[in-house]
Image (tube, rainbow, N blue to C red):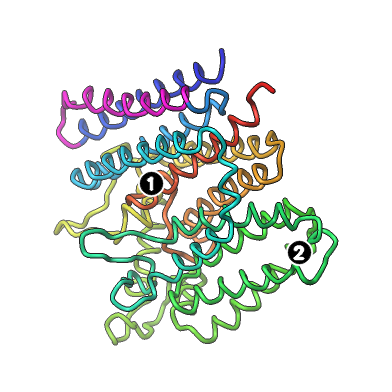
Amino acid sequence: MNARRRELFGLVLAGLIASVALATVTLARDAEISPDVVTWGALFLGLYVVAHVVIRRTAPNADGALLPLTAVLTAFGVTTIYRLDPGDGGRQAVWIAAGVAALAGTLLWFRHDYRVLESYRYLFGVGAVALLLLPSLPGLGETVNGARLWVDLGVIQFQPGELAKICLILFLAGYLREKRESLARGQLKDVGPLLAIWGAAMLVIVVTNDLGSALLNFGIFLAMLYVATGRALFVAAGLTLFLGGAAVLYNAIGHVQDRVTIWLQPWTDEPVYCSLTGELALRQDCASYQLVKSLYSIANGGFGGTGLGQGTFTSVDGSQLIPYLRTDFIFSAIAQELGLVGAAAVLLVFMLFVVRGMRVALQADDGFSKLLAAGLTFGFALQTFIIVGGVLRVVPLTGITLPFVSYGGTSIVANFVLLALLLLVSNRANEPR
C-alpha cells in the first residue's frame, strides 16, 4: 500500500472517530443520536478527501501519515468545542475548512519548488519581529489575561504570534543554512543573530507580557541552531542568556511574577492581596482560579473519564467554571471527559505527528529543507508541551493554543500552513531521482 492509499485509509478512520465522538456528545445531551451526525461525518471526511486529492496532485510522494493525524486532532478539537458551545463548534468547523483551503493554496503555490522561500529569508525575519510586536501598538493590541497577544481590527481579530512562528522558522532555515559552517567554527561575527534574537525575545516579554511566545520562539531558534551546527555549547549559552534575561525581567514585570507565583503556589491557606478586586482573598479564588479549577477538572476525569458530553464545566447557575476553556484550557475538558487513557491517547497522536515530522527532516537531502522540517516539527512539539505543561502545572501557564485542537482561526490556519510545508519537504525527499 503506497503513501496516498494509507493516507486515504487513515482519513476514513478519522472520519469514523469524528462521527462516533459527535454521536456520543449528542446522545449525552439529548438522550438520542441526531441524524445530523451522519451529515457531519460525511462533510468532515469530504473536506479531508479534498485535501487528499490536492496532495495526490501536488505532493504525491509526501508522508502518508501527517494528514490523517491532523484529521484526528481536529476531530477531537471540534467535537470538544461543539460539546462546550454548539455555536463555537460550527465556527471552528468553518475555520478548519479555511485551514484546508490554506493547505491546498500553499501546496499549489509552491508545488514546483518551495525552496524559493529561502531567497526571502530576511523579509521573513523582519516580518516575524513585526508580527510579534504588532499587539503592542496602541489601538491595535488587545490585552487578554494580562498579556497582549491579540490584534483587533474591528471586523477581524487574530493572534499574530502564530504567523510569526512560521516566518521565524523560514528565516532561520535560510540564514542558518547559509552560515552554518562559520557558526560551527565559532566565528564571533556570525554569533550576532543569537544575541539579536535573544534581545527580540526579551523585548517581546517587555512589551506584551507574553512569556510563552518568547519561550516558544527562542526555543525554536536554539533547536534549529543545534541542528545546523551540532554544537551543544550554543544551546547552553542560549539557555543561559534566556534564563538570565527572564530572571531580570521577573523582578521588573509584575505580570511575569504573577505567572510564576501562580505556578509555584496556586493554593494559599491565608488570604493574600487580589489584584483583580483590590481586596484580600485566597489565591485559588483569585489569581490562580483558572489553574486550580483546571486541575480539579482533570482530577475529576480519573482513569477512564466521565464520558464525552458528561463532564462538569458549568456551575448550578450556568456560569462557566473554567474561563477560556475552549482555548487555553481545552486539554482540561478533554482530560475530564476522556480520562487519563483518552488524554494520553490524544498526546500520543501529537507524538506521532512529531515523530513523522522529524522523519521528514532526516530524509531531506538539502540544508534548507532539513532545517525547515526540523524547525516546523520542533515548534509544533514545543508549543504542545508549553500549553499542556501549563495546564498540568509542569511549567508556568501561558496563553498559547494547543495546535489543531484549541478554538481559534489564526492557530488553525497557521498550523495547516505548517503541515503543507512539511508535506512539500517530504514530497521532495521521497520523489524518485
For residue 74, side relative to residue 210 (left or right): left
Q: Name the kind of residue labelled 1 in the image.
A: Ile
Q: Is residue 37 magenta?
A: yes
Magenta highlight range? 29-57
Looking at the image, do the residues carrying marks 1 and 2 touch, with CB atoms under 8 Å apart? no
First along the sequence among labels 1 and 2: 2
- Report helix, strand or loop for mark 1: helix
Q: Residue 186 appears in which quarter of the rendering?
A: bottom right
Q: Against 373, is 222 above or below?
A: below
Q: Which mark is residue 412?
A: 1
What residue sits 63% from the left and 60% below the top?
221
For residue 215, side relative to residue 105 (left or right): right
Q: Nearer the viewer, residue 352 or 136?
A: 136
Circle 2 residue: 234
* x and y, in percent, of residue 359 in the image: 65, 35
Q: Which mark is residue 424?
A: none
Q: Nearer the viewer, residue 65 or 316?
A: 65
Q: Against 195, is 13 above or below?
A: above
* x and y, in percent, of residue 173 in the image: 64, 52
- Report helix, strand or loop for mark 2: helix
Q: Name the kind of residue labelled 2 in the image.
A: Phe
| Tag count | 2
